[in-house]
Structures are given as C-alpha cells and as structure tokens.
Amino acid sequence: GQPDVYGYGFETGFEHDFSPTTRLTALVGIEHSEPDEGSSSDDWIADISVRRRLQTTWLLARYRRNVSAQGDGDLSIRDEIHLGFTRQLTELIEAGIGVRGYTADGITGDANDRDYVQIRTEFEWDISRRLSMIGDYRYTILDREEENESANANQLFVYLQYSFGDAD
C-alpha cells in the first residue's frame, strides 16, 4: 500500500472593500506535510480573489496555491488562476465565460507534474423566481509531463436548478 501522509497548516486572512462594488479577499498561510516515508515539506499556501459587481456585470480574478493529494497519496503543489465574466443580458437571462488553469508540481513520491486549462461558457434562464434552466459548456486540456501524455474533453451540461427558501 501507499504510505500515509500527515499534515497541518495555518492560514490567516482578511477582506477589504475598495468600494461598494469591489472586494478583495486574501488568505495566506503555510502547510506542513509529512509522509510516513521520505522527507517533510513546508509550503506556503494562498487564496486571493478580487470580485467586482457592476449593475449588470460580475468580474472575478482569483489565484490559489495549495497542497493537493493525488489518489495514490503523493502530494503536489497546485497553482491555480481563475478569471470569470458574467453579464445579465435581460431580466431573465444571464451569460458567463471563464477560464481556469492550474499547474501542479510533485513534491512527494511519484507525483506527476501536470497542467490543466479549462474554458467555460454558461447561460442561465430564470423560468420563474425559483426555477432556472442552465446550459454549461466546458472545453478542457490536460497535459501530464511525466508520462508525456495529454488529453482534451468537450462537456455539455443542461440542468434545472430549484432554489428553496426566500426568493428575491
């Protein structure tokens, strides 16, 4: 079997409103990981985002760095960037586009280095105050450097979303 990995961390953060429409959220810290076999690792982690909401538009820029485990117990450092744009087209229809990418670098065992990019579009139609129909298309590219392999995927999701509780 694979060795167990033990870890602990500390993270602190703050939020700051630059204006009624723009918010910065920042979390930073350190994570200590210690596998049963091998050397321990101390790595800095972060989650920093800026969100801006205008009358009909939402913007998001986010950077995250964390220690992530793979299915076999090996660890990697994952740096991720997410950019998103959403716009209210009509009173009932909203559309968005986003891009998310990450790179993961192995820090224990045989953890694979990999790169991932996803482009996403989404449309939401408010059928009623509580019921929405959502169409979501994603194109994804994954590259595993160690095995010299890559793959891509096209995904299309169409679903209904019901909101319980008070509707605005």
Image (cartoon, helix red, strand yellow):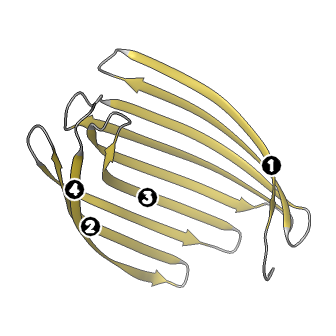
Q: Which amino acid, mark 2? A: Val
Sequence-wise, the earlier of marks 1 and 4 is 4
Q: CA distance from mark 3 to mark 4?
A: 25 Å
Crowding at dot 2, Cα within 10 Å, few <14 / some 14-19 / many 20+, comes out as some
| Image height of 58 relative to 118, above or below | below
Observer-nearest of 147 and 120: 147
* Place of residue 100 in the rendered image (x, y in percent of width and height, measured from the top left): 49, 45
Q: CA distance from mark 4 to mark 2?
A: 17 Å
* Place of residue 30 in the rendered image (x, y in percent of width and height, measured from the top left): 19, 62
Tell which tag, 4 or 2, sits nearer the viewer.
4
Query: Label 4 belongs to which residue?
Result: 7
Q: Which amino acid, mark 1? A: Tyr
Tell which tag, 3 or 1, sits nearer the viewer.
1
Q: Residue at x 10, y 37 (%)?
A: 38
Query: Label 3 belongs to which residue?
Result: 62
Query: Label 1 belongs to which residue?
Result: 159
Crowding at dot 1, Cα within 10 Å, few <14 / some 14-19 / many 20+, comes out as few
Q: CA distance from mark 1 to mark 4?
A: 38 Å
Observer-nearest of 143 and 83: 143
